[in-house]
Image (cartoon, rainbow, N blue to C red):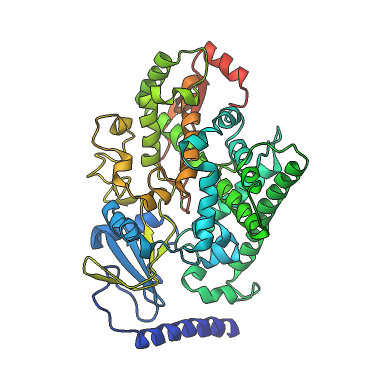
Amino acid sequence: MATFMSWLDLCLACAGVYLIKRIVSKKNLAPFPPGPKPLPLFGNLLDKPSVKQWLTFSDWANKFGDMIHLEIFGQHTVILNSANAAVEMLEKKSSIYSDRPTLPMGGELIGWKDALVLLPYGDKFREHRRNFHRVLGGRTAVSVYHPIEEMETHKTAGAIILRISYGYCIREGGDPFVDLAGKVIDDFARYTAVGAFMVDSIPALAYVPEWFPGAGFKRKARECHADLLNMINQLFELAKKQMAAGIACKSLTSDLLERKASTEEEHDIKWTAGMMLAGGADTGKQTNVPQTVSSNYAFFLAMTLYPEVQRKAQAEIDAVIGSDRLPTFADRESLPYVEALVKEVYRWHAVVPVVLPHRLTVDDIHNGYYIPRGTLMTIDTVMRYSHLYRGMLHDPSIYPNPMEFNPNRFLPGEASVLVSIVPARSLLLDGLVNGFNIYQQVCTFADASVWLTVAMSLAVFEISKVVENGVEITPEVDPSSGTISHPKLFKCSIKARSAKALELIQQNPRH
C-alpha cells in the first residue's frame, strides 16, 4: 500500500506541475501540429513507443502528416517525417533549433552528457566541434589515417577506431578494450533511444532511490556509468603515458593533446576521443564487436539476398583491379558501382532510424502551427506503413521500390542521389546521409572504413544463403530498436571466390 501511494504521490505531483504550467502559460498563437489525442493530465504518455519507434511514427505519419505533435506532462515533442520538413526547420531555422535537450537516462544518469551529440548548443559544443575539425577537417585530413584503416581492416573493425582514436593496438586473440567498448556503445544505443525509459518523459523519476520498486533503471544506470568512465579514462590515460614515454602512435588524442593549453581542454579532448570511439564503434548487444558494424552487417545481409548485385560489383573489381591484390583507397574513384553499392547500404539499412532530438530555444510558428519553446524535435529517418517503407531514406516518391536493394539508384545520371535529399549541413551532422549520428568529419572516416570492408570482402569472398538439410535459408530483414539499429542476426555462407582469393585471405588472415 505504501509503495502504491508513493507512486501515486509522484504521479499526482507531476500532474500538478503540468496543470500549474498550463494555467499560467500564455494562450497559444496557433494550434499545435496534429498528433494522437492526449489523455487528461497524462497527455500522450501511453502513446509514446519504447521499441522500434519508427513503426509507430510511420503509422502516425500516414494519419497526421510530416509533423506529429506529442505532449507528456507539459513536455512537447514534434516528430519530423520528411526531408523537406527537416530541412525547413532544422537547417533554415538552425539558429533556434540547434540546441540539445538533457536526456535523464543516457545523458545524466549514465554520463553521456559530456559527449558532443548530447551537448547543448554553446561554447562547449563549439569547442568539441573544433576538436574534431582540427584533426579530421575534411577528406584530406582523414586520408592521413587511410594507411591505418587499410592495415587494421585485416584485423577487426574495433582495431581501426581504437588505433585512430587513441593510438591503441589491439591484442591478438581477444582484447579487453574491444570488449569494454562494445558494451559501452551498446549501452549508448539502448539507453539514449527516444522514449525507451519513463525517466526521460518524467525527469523527477531520476531522484527516486535505487531500492525503490520499479527503479531498477537506477541500478543499471550506475553500472553503465562505471563502464563508460572506465573506457574513457583508461584509454585516455594510456595514450598520455605513451606520449610521455615517446612511444605514442599518431591518433586523434595525441594530436589534440599536443595542442592543449589547460586542464579544461584536456577534459574536452578526453570526451572528443570518447565520442570518436562511439561514432566508430556501434556494436549492438548481439554482435559485441566494434563499429561501422551495423552497416557492414547490412552489407553482408544484402549480398546474401541479392546475389546479382554482388556479381556485378565483383565483375567491376575484377576488371579494374584484377585478382592479384586487394582493393585500396586509391582504387575508390575507379569503382563507381562499388561506390553506389555502399551508398545503397546506407539507404537500405538506416543505422540511426530515429535521430537524437534537438530542442527549440524560442517559440516558433511553422506552416501555421505553434511550436513552443523547449519542444523536442526528432527526425524519423525510416518509416513503414501498409507494408511499405516511407521516409527520408525509404520514401517511395524518391526511391521506387524502397525495400529493394538497388545500387543503380546512385550511379551517375540516376535521379535518386542520396545527398540531394539532405543538402543541409545540420542534417548531415545528424547522420541522414549515411546513418552515423556524429559530425561530418567522423562520417567521412566511418564511410571510408565501410567502403574498404565492402571492397575487400567483394574481392575475395562469395556470400550466399546457407543450405541446411537441403533447404535454402532466406534471412529476415528485421532491424533492431535503439539509437543505433542493427540487422537481425542471420546465417550466410562466406567462401573464398577462388584459389587466388584464398591465397590473398591467407596473406591477410584476420581479413
| Residue 15 percent coordinates (x, y) | 43, 83
Q: How many tags in the picture?
A: 0
- Which residue is located at x 50 percent, y 57 percent? 126
Left or right position of 115 against 463: right
Please name whichever residue, 258 or 406, is drawn nearer the observer in this view of the structure.
Answer: 258
User: Would you say residue 72 is visible in this rendering?
Assistant: yes
Q: Is residue 490 visible?
A: no
Q: Is residue 370 above or below residue 410?
A: below
Name the one closer to the observer, 244 or 396. 244
Residue 48 location, quadrant: bottom left
Residue 474 vertical position relative to residue 133 in the rendered view, above or below: above
Above or below, comparing residue 431 to residue 97 in the picture:
above
Residue in the image at 64% along x and 60% along y: 264
Q: Look at the picture and state if 453 lies above or below 30.
A: above
Along the horizontal axis of the image, is 201 left or right of 241?
left
Give the camera-side residue of 18 and 429: 429
Residue plotted at (38% across, 21% down): 311
Q: Quadrant of the C terminus?
A: top right
| Rendering coords of residue 396 (x, y %) | 24, 44
Question: In the image, residue 172 lies at what x, y percent?
Answer: 70, 32
Q: How far across and down, in percent of the image, does residue 417 sit?
A: 29, 38
Location of the N terminus by quadrant is: bottom right
Q: Residue furthest right?
A: 245
